[in-house]
Image (spheres, rainbow, N blue to C red):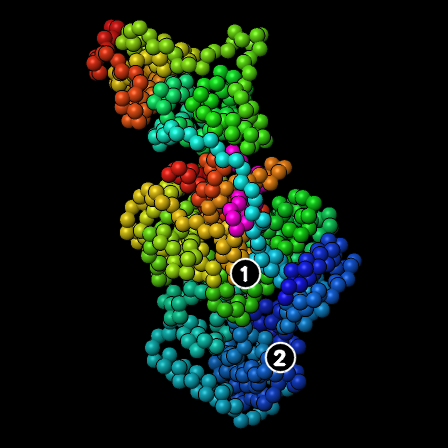
């Protein structure tokens, strides 16, 4: 019985050898020891070598598949350094997933800033995506690594095939330097209420075309979050215009996503450094006529 | 006194060419003992390869409905080759007049009694009613092959059209399976190195013919084999293995009557005989708390197939995990919705599809909503999980994937390949698994609970439980 494994290998090799050339060209060798009766169909009286080969191959193939054995136990790789920070909430992590696939990614710097100030950890399954994205974007890489922590260097060492560096990507060369923007959230304007009024007025003037959307997006990403409900209200109220509709829907989505993000981090760290404005919430926006 | 049929008339009753050919060889005196006839019947003992002879009788009394047959061979063809052979022997004037043999006399008496009863009440479907004996049928039942042993044929079914459709379908399937087996033998004769094997058209034509024969599951399988040609240096081994398994299915499906009922049902499902949902839901359910353990999708010829794996939260007494697979289909391009969130658990009745290795199931009555379930499934050591997988494959060698739940850590094998390991052994991860970095990062180098599918290519991780978080890979 101990030889059945070896004889299976011999039988299989013989069958494969004949099958590759074809039974018309190469005679089917007799079965190996232990495989004489298996795969032989007693009821078939046809002396067909091809059918006999298939019968015998079926027996060995079944044994090969069913006789699956685990490989040798492997040595574990060095464990990742322990990160004492709690993992951010599910809502925040889902949101980061959405931002990373390009949905309102203007909010990414703010996500990092809030995560850092709340002292939270990025869920591990999103770490590779961040590091891969940072391979060609040094400022993004630096911002992401400041939130990821030591796991970045550990992953770079554990999976060299990813092409991630153990240390942050070197700053860009001098030539490209002017184009590089620091990866930080836009500074809040001195008067967010006025910015909201201005945004809403662009819809009244039908100036909020799709071409103007990038500037509007930056403005929405920068305003004080207490003004977000008012902005959403006004954007919902804005009358329909074919010229501005696309930008309106986009800004509405951005404002809502940002509100979700603020709430997600406020839950995690109610006493944290979330941006707490002095203005009472729900301030009515004065609109330009 | 009925008119003696001509040999041509007898052969026209054959369900297929194979039966006719076999009948020709058995229509000689050497094959029969105690063959006899009278005005309305023919009978005889067929000397078979097995110890007991087959007792064959043919009732010729009904001129309108044609002859009725009885034979205790396992074949499900009606008439079987023995009955045809006897009739042919009779047509060739080989059978002498004699006293009825006891089994023939008893059977003919029962038929006569039933015919009288039928005259009094309107017959529904004579063919169905005559199946009561389990080993007899009239010519009206038409031709059917081994695959006609449809698992869900309800005797006394009030819908004769359904039986007719099933018989027609099984006849088409049987012809398709015979053609498949011929095709396989041709490939082996010509050799796997023959250039036509590298031509995708060769495989596509076969798959198209199998689709016509309503063996859709086999057609998809053939197309998957086609992708293995020339995949790597040892592709001949992979392809021979698959061809051998196709041969097993083609031969098995034609002889399901000789198999155990569970195995026969497994063969039916693998060849593409569909089972109606209502019939599945009519079965006895398994009630438990089921964890939604993972989801995988594959594309099969313009449709997306989604497998949702459920496992028993409590675990069965033997320590084995009970697995269930819910299948969902979507037109390719359209997303198939997940029935339940992964990582949740629900209490529900599951109804199993027939087959020895019951994996596919339907959710019947749902006792609770799917709620998040933090503990996750209970993992097994790799050696034990693979052993369970091996037993399942030994039961149904054509199984293509089997779920595993293990607690293991990733370890590099070199050359970009990875494996999962614990103290009992390791299992390789399929090449080209694109979420490997996520898996490594979630594990942090330590063992985590993983659910995935085993296939001949390796282990495909689907879901990871780490840091109280469910990560869908």
Q: Chain of mark 1?
A: B
Q: Residue at x 45, y 76 (%)?
A: B134
Q: Which mark is residue B49?
A: 2
Determine the secondary structure under disc 2.
Answer: loop
Task: Name the one closer to the observer, B46 or A271.
Answer: A271
Q: How many marks?
A: 2
Residue A86 position within the rendered picture, expressed as x and y whole percent measured from the top left: 36, 30
Q: Is residue B348 magenta?
A: no
Q: Residue at x 56, y 47 (%)?
A: A73
Task: Name the one closer to the observer, B347 or B89.
Answer: B347
Dividing the picture into quadrants, the one containing residue A222 is top left
Q: Residue furthest right?
A: A25
Callout in the foreground (2, 1) = 1
> Where does the magenta region start and end?
B420-438
Is residue A104 found left or right of B299 in the rendered image? left
The answer to whether the residue labelled 2 contacts the one labelled 1, judged by CB atoms less than 8 Å apart, is no
Residue placed under numbered mark 1 in the picture: B394
Q: CA distance from mark 2 to mark 1?
A: 29 Å
Q: Residue at x 56, y 51 (%)?
A: A70
Name the N-terminal-most of marks 2 and 1: 2
Q: Chain of mark 2?
A: B
Q: Residue furthest bottom?
A: B99
């Amino acid at each position: 019985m101990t030889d059945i494994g070896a004889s299976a290998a011999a039988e299989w090799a013989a069958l494969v050898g004949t099958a590759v050339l074809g039974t018309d060209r190469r005679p089917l060798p007799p079965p190996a020891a232990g495989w004489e009766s298996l795969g032989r169909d007693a009821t078939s009286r046809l002396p067909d070598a091809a059918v006999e080969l298939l019968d015998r191959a079926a027996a060995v193939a079944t044994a090969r598949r069913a006789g699956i054995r685990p490989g040798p136990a492997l040595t574990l790789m060095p464990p990742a350094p322990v990160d004492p920070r709690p993992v951010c909430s599910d809502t925040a992590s889902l949101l980061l997933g959405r931002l990373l696939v390009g949905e309102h990614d203007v909010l990414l710097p703010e996500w990092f800033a809030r995560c850092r100030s709340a002292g939270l950890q990025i869920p591990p399954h999103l770490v590779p995506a961040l590091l891969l994205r940072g391979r060609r974007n040094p400022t993004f890489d630096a911002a992401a690594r400041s939130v990821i922590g030591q796991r970045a260097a550990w992953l770079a060492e554990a999976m060299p095939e990813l092409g991630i560096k153990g240390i942050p990507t070197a700053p860009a060369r001098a030539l490209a330097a002017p184009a590089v923007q620091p990866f930080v959230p836009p500074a809040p304007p001195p008067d967010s209420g006025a910015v909201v009024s201005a945004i809403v007025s662009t819809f009244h003037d039908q100036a909020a075309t799709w071409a103007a959307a990038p500037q509007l997006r930056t403005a929405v990403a920068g305003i004080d979050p207490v003004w977000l409900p008012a902005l959403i209200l006004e954007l919902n109220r804005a009358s329909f215009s074919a010229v501005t509709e696309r930008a309106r829907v986009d800004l509405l989505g951005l404002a809502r996503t940002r509100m979700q993000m603020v709430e997600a981090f406020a839950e995690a760290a109610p006493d944290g450094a979330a941006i707490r404005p002095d203005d009472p919430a729900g301030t009515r926006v004065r609109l330009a006529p | 006194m009925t008119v003696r049929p001509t040999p041509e008339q007898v052969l026209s009753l054959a369900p297929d060419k194979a039966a006719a050919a076999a009948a020709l060889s058995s229509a000689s005196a050497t094959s029969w003992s105690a063959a006899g006839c009278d005005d309305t019947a023919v009978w005889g003992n067929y000397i078979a390869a097995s110890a007991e002879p087959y007792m064959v009788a043919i009732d010729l009394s009904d001129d309108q409905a044609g002859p009725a047959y009885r034979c205790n061979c396992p074949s499900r063809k009606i008439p079987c080759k023995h009955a045809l052979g006897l009739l042919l022997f009779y047509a060739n004037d080989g059978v002498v007049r004699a006293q009825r043999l006891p089994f023939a006399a008893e059977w003919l008496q029962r038929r006569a009694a039933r015919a009288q009863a039928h005259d009094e009440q309107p017959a529904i479907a004579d063919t169905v009613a005559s199946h009561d004996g389990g080993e007899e049928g009239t010519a009206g039942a038409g031709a059917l092959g081994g695959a006609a042993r449809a698992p869900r044929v309800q005797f006394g079914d009030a819908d004769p059209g359904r039986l007719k459709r099933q018989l027609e379908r099984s006849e088409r399937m049987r012809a398709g399976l015979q053609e498949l087996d011929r095709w396989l033998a041709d490939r082996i004769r010509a050799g796997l190195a023959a250039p036509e094997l590298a031509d995708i058209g060769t495989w596509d034509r076969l798959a198209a013919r199998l689709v016509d024969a309503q063996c859709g599951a086999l057609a998809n399988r053939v197309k998957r084999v086609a992708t293995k040609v020339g995949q790597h240096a040892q592709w001949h081994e992979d392809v021979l293995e698959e061809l051998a398994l196709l041969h097993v299915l083609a031969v098995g499906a034609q002889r399901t009557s000789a198999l155990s009922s569970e195995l026969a049902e497994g063969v039916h499902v693998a060849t593409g005989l569909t089972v109606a949902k209502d019939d599945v839901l009519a079965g006895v359910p398994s009630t438990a708390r089921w964890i939604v353990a993972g989801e995988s999708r594959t594309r099969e010829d313009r449709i997306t197939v989604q497998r949702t794996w459920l496992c028993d939260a409590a675990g069965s007494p033997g320590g084995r995990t009970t697995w269930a697979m819910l299948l969902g289909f979507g037109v390719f391009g359209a997303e198939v919705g997940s029935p339940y969130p992964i990582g949740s658990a629900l209490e529900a009745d599951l109804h199993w599809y027939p087959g020895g290795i019951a994996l596919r199931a339907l959710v019947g009555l749902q006792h609770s909503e799917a709620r998040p379930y933090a503990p996750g499934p209970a993992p097994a050591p790799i050696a034990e999980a693979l052993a369970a997988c091996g037993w399942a494959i030994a039961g149904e060698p054509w199984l293509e994937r089997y779920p595993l739940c293990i607690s293991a850590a990733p370890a590099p094998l070199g050359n970009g390949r990875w494996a999962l390991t614990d103290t009992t052994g390791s299992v390789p991860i399929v090449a080209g698994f694109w979420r490997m970095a996520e898996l490594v990062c979630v594990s942090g180098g330590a063992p985590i609970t993983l659910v995935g599918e085993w296939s001949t290519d390796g282990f495909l991780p689907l879901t990871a439980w780490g840091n109280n978080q469910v990560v869908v890979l």
